Image: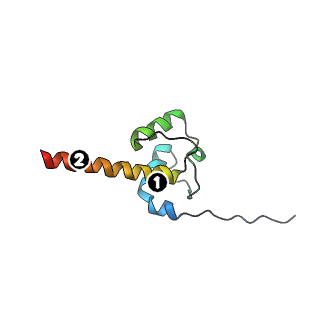
Amino acid sequence: MKSKKVVMASVNLIKRYNHEIDLLLDILGHSEALVTDESLIDDFAATKKTLALLAKNVGINISIHDRLVFVAQLYRKYMREVNKEIKNVRHNT
């Protein structure tokens, strides 16, 4: 029987969104997990409660079928908007 070769998926986006990925993995309870650009939220046995917590922290509805890097990208965008609003409030007071 011929053995199959295991090939690691890319981690380019994981590296780019490292900070956000770390936060998401902490929320999912898998801070030491091996993740790739192909990792799905479902890979971390997310419960409805965990998805609700993620949605609250990220500011979007999240599906178990979403890729972790997609959620990280949305989280970064959301936090940039929050930071802009904070700066605007500080500037106007």
Quarter the C terminus occupies = top left
Percent position (x, y) of residue 22? Answer: 45, 53
Q: 65 or 46: which is nearer to us? A: 65
Q: Callout 2 environment at 10 Å: few (<14), some (14 to 19), or many (20+)? A: few
Q: Specify the amino acid type for callout 1.
A: Ile
In terms of secondary structure, where does tag 1 sit?
helix
Q: Callout 1 environment at 10 Å: few (<14), some (14 to 19), or many (20+)? A: many
6 to the left or right of 84: right
Q: Name the residue under label 2.
A: 86
84 to the left or right of 69: left
Furthest residue toward top: 49
Earlier along the polypeptide chain: callout 2 or callout 1?
1
Residue at the location (49% across, 37% down)?
50
Q: 34 or 53: which is nearer to us? A: 53
Q: Nearer the viewer, mark 2 or mark 1?
A: 2
- Asked where in the image residue 4 lies, by quadrant, the reply is bottom right
Q: Mark 1 points at which residue?
A: 21
Q: Is residue 26 above or below residue 47?
A: below
